[in-house]
Image: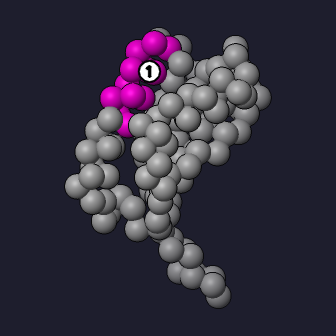
Amino acid sequence: MPYFLLRLEPPRPTFPFDATEAEKALFQEHAAYWMARAQDGRAIAVGPVFEPGDDAGPVKQPAKTWGFALVEAADAAEAVSLGAADPVIRAEAGFRYAAAPVPSLILRQP
């Protein structure tokens, strides 16, 4: 079965450091949703990514936070539907997913 990377973009560049109480509650639902997808075998790995900023170049790049879910799905439509069912998307709270195929993957063996 094919693999896909779902990249969750936050509603603003300062998220999650300035998350509201409502967003924090929503993220508990988000975590529970992805834990269930991991248990049913569709999510391989899910978590936040904290990219450091870059102060070295002529144009300073701020730090960036986003989330990822590496999923196994029959096709791109199924992968996209996994993201669409995430409570943070269903709540229309300003988050969005981008999906990209992962054509080959080396997995560690248990």
The residue indicated by pointer 1 is: 38
Q: Look at the picture and state if 1 lies above or below 96.
A: above
Q: Residue at x 64, y 32 (%)?
A: 80
Q: Nearer the viewer, residue 60 or 66?
A: 66
Q: Nearer the viewer, residue 6 or 109?
A: 6
Q: How many marks?
A: 1
Q: Look at the picture and state if 25 lies above or below 108.
A: below
Q: Residue at x 67, y 39 (%)?
A: 99
| Residue lying at the far bottom of the rendered structure | 58
Q: Nearer the viewer, residue 1 or 31?
A: 31
Q: Residues within 10 Å of mark 1 (few under 14, many from 20)?
A: some
Q: For the magenta stretch, what is the residue range?
A: 30-41
Where is residue 60 shown, x and y percent of the image?
Answer: 57, 82
Residue 72, image quadrant: top right
**Is 15 situated left or right of 78 in this image?**
left
Where is residue 24 shown, x and y percent of the image?
Answer: 27, 50
Q: Residue at x 53, y 80 (%)?
A: 55
Residue 97, image quadrant: top right
| SS at circle 1 | helix
Q: Residue at x 70, y 16 (%)?
A: 74
